[in-house]
Image (cartoon, grey):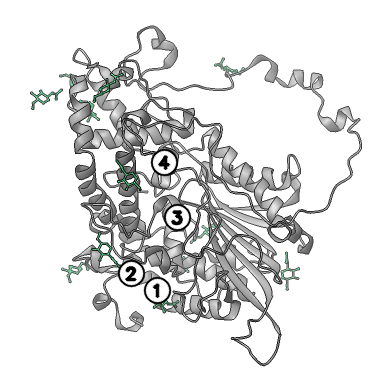
Amino acid sequence: MTLTVFVLGLFAVTHAQHVCAVQWVERAASAASSFAGETTSAVFPVPNATNAASEYDSFFPDASAVGFAGPTPTGDEAELIATATSFPKVTDALPLVNPSTFGETNSSEPFDVLHSLGNLSPMFSVDTFGLDNANMLIPQGCELTQVHLLHRHGARYPTSGSLPAAFATKLHNTTINGTGFTATGNLTFLNTWTYRLGAEILTPFGRQQLFDLGVSFRVKYGELLKDFTGLPVFRTTSEERMVQSALNFAAGFFGIPDYQTNYRQVITIENDGFNNSLAVNCANQDKPEIGGIGSAAASKWRDVYLQDALARLAPQIEGVNLTTNDLLSMQELCAYEAVALGYSAFCDLFTEEEWKGFNYLLDLEFWYGSGPGNPTTAAVGIGYVQELIARLTQTPIAVHNTSTNATITDSNITFPLDQPIFVDASHDTDISAIVVAMNFTSLNANGPLPTDHIPGNQTYFSNRIAPFATQLVGQVMICPSSSSSSPQQNENEKQIRWLLNDAVLPLTGIAGCPEDANGLCPLDTFVSAMQTRLAEVDFAFDCTGNYTVPDPDLITDGRPPADQRPSSSSV
Ligand SMILES: *[C@@H]1O[C@H](CO)[C@@H](O)[C@H](O)[C@H]1NC(C)=O
Ligand SMILES: *[C@@H]1O[C@H](CO)[C@@H](O)[C@H](O)[C@H]1NC(C)=O
Ligand SMILES: *[C@@H]1O[C@H](CO)[C@@H](O)[C@H](O)[C@H]1NC(C)=O
Ligand SMILES: *[C@@H]1O[C@H](CO)[C@@H](O)[C@H](O)[C@H]1NC(C)=O
Ligand SMILES: *[C@@H]1O[C@H](CO)[C@@H](O)[C@H](O)[C@H]1NC(C)=O
Ligand SMILES: *[C@@H]1O[C@H](CO)[C@@H](O)[C@H](O)[C@H]1NC(C)=O
Ligand SMILES: *[C@@H]1O[C@H](CO)[C@@H](O)[C@H](O)[C@H]1NC(C)=O
Ligand SMILES: *[C@@H]1O[C@H](CO)[C@@H](O)[C@H](O)[C@H]1NC(C)=O
Ligand SMILES: *[C@@H]1O[C@H](CO)[C@@H](O)[C@H](O)[C@H]1NC(C)=O
Ligand SMILES: *[C@@H]1O[C@H](CO)[C@@H](O)[C@H](O)[C@H]1NC(C)=O
Ligand SMILES: *[C@@H]1O[C@H](CO)[C@@H](O)[C@H](O)[C@H]1NC(C)=O
Ligand SMILES: *[C@@H]1O[C@H](CO)[C@@H](O)[C@H](O)[C@H]1NC(C)=O
């Protein structure tokens, strides 16, 4: 498929590209004379490792052959979410080194570089989306009946063709016909720096994120496993990092080696030309004037917030003329080296303000590229909404007119509707679209983001919506109906609420949902709002129609301008 990466190329929109980083110098061949910027990689295990041969198998019997496992009584399922009085939060990213920043730090306010990397941040628990008295624990008196988890893959290497590798090439190019470059001062490390990142696949830390999520989900929601009548069916997509994320989640959730027999994994095809609600193809995104809106906004801001850094760092290297794009590449290198190698010398080059600037650049990229400011966003997210309605109402999908794949979702084997636990793996750009399709408008309350400053009233943050291993959780529960909504009786009713990275989302923007301190909305009300969304978002037109975007700031609902929509769909 066409590589849909405009300028910045930070996203997961490249489908099924099995790509290795360009390797023009092998480590072994050049260890003695390493040129800065060269690409190095490793292969493990060594090809034809001696003791890997099958003749050695008998020396290493497996646990069942060895026997003597000791007593193995199982305990009861955990359900922290309903039994605990306080709750765990993800605040750090061990074993990664917490990066320091350049210059004075602002001690009045804690600052964490790893939380300021936009969608490249490892997931951390969000404090609040405005419901300050709500938390992830099931409210008193309510009984949890079902949970829906939509998560992103864990930390990965850069996607193919993105900035970090190009920066390494730029440095390395100086050594090919010329005499190279000389870095001094803060940049001295560049003289011996080599590019050690792969592409696309999970890093070891990324594996850990999903394993940890699996463990955490078992501790919080394990009790629901008792309600399964068959094996759980979870979904992911075919890209290597997606499969690996799903398997690591399962290893954490079910245990090793139990995960191999305790559930069924659906792996949907992620590639050009395939319907996939978790990795959506939307043709209009291949048009630069639509797919490139996010990068265009980000580039404007890049040239604002990196000027001081350019003035500071450019004089510290000779033989290379640094640009703001190079500095952005270096900030990305910090992000990627940190999650891949545990430490990055690039992080220390930038001030706290510059890290805030980087974080904001990614907010711009998401708002305008795969958020409320892009006309394709609601369409990209609506397929998951359609599937969610099917699950919440236990009614198969009637018409396939979005990104859903009938082969998968019309079958009760691959798409059971009645599970107590649903787990789907997806990508940053798809999840950021799904929250728009679901109409979680509190996330974008204060409108379009400016490209010349960071607004004080910002509510849209890509590090909360789409970090590595981001987690959107729907909790379905039965609660005593509130006296105000049904004064006549104390009948129980089904409610739903949503948590994004551990914080409860207000649902008050969703049609009919009442204000509720715990973020609850009656299930029927929520479902009919989602049905309204499904009826009003026109996948065919938004993804393949011919429309123009005269001013991106006029788009705040992830749909084409209202006056250009076909009349049948402009509800
Ligand atoms: C590994 O073993 C295979 C089969 O014996 C052989 O063809 C191949 O050349 C070996 N590769 C290396 C790197 O030694
Ligand atoms: C430090 O943080 C305070 C409180 O957020 C803020 O008012 C101030 O501008 C910050 N100073 C710098 C140098 O960033
Ligand atoms: C490196 O040099 C090659 C050959 O001149 C050129 O095509 C390429 O654009 C250069 N890459 C960068 C990032 O400067
Ligand atoms: C090196 O020089 C050759 C011959 O002039 C040219 O084709 C090539 O693009 C140059 N490479 C770089 C990286 O500058
Ligand atoms: C880094 O750069 C600053 C000036 O921008 C300078 O004061 C400082 O000494 C440099 N650090 C090193 C290790 O050269
Ligand atoms: C739907 O999924 C099935 C199973 O992965 C696949 O064979 C088929 O090609 C897909 N269809 C479309 C239209 O994507
Ligand atoms: C850097 O810019 C200067 C001034 O424009 C120019 O003379 C020089 O050739 C450039 N150096 C490189 C490596 O591009
Ligand atoms: C794939 O999506 C298109 C567009 O929504 C739809 O017309 C088609 O029926 C879908 N195919 C399958 C197999 O679901
Ligand atoms: C699917 O539905 C059919 C017909 O209702 C039923 O017989 C079958 O057991 C179901 N299969 C699963 C895996 O739920
Ligand atoms: C948010 O702040 C920006 C200035 O940064 C302003 O233009 C905008 O009107 C504000 N939005 C709201 C809803 O207050
Ligand atoms: C979507 O959100 C907007 C703004 O909160 C609201 O006016 C509209 O009614 C919502 N639509 C649905 C179907 O929830
Ligand atoms: C799209 O619409 C524009 C303006 O109405 C028109 O000029 C153009 O030919 C159309 N393109 C296609 C592919 O229909």
CA separation, marks 3 and 1? 21 Å
Q: Nearer the viewer, mark 2 or mark 3?
A: 3
| Distance from Cα at disc 4 to Cα at disc 2 | 35 Å
Tell me the number on the disc at residue 537: 1
Q: Tag 1 or tag 3, which sits nearer the N-term?
A: 3
Determine whether the residue tagged by mark 3 lies in a helix, strand or loop.
Answer: helix
Total numbered circles? 4
Type of amino acid under label 4: Phe
Q: Residue furthest front?
A: 108
> Quick check: 107 left or right of 179?
right
Q: Earlier in the sequence, mark 2 or mark 1?
A: 1
Mark 4 = which residue?
A: 111
Depth check, mark 3 against mark 4: the one in front is: 4
Give the percent coordinates (x, y) of residue 571: 36, 83
Quarter of the image holding residue 376? bottom left
Instruction: Say whether disc 4 or disc 1 marks the residue closer to the N-terminus.
Output: 4
Q: Secondary structure at mark 1?
A: loop
Circles 2, 3 touching at the beta carbon (< 8 Å): no
Residue 61, how many percent across, how many down? 82, 25
Mark 1 CB lies closer than 8 A to ligand 11: no
Residue 559 numbered mark, or none: 2
**In 3D space, how far apart are the residues under numbered discs 2 and 1 (Cα atoms)?**
8 Å
Q: Within 10 angstroms of label 3, few (less than 14), some, or many (20 or more) residues?
A: many
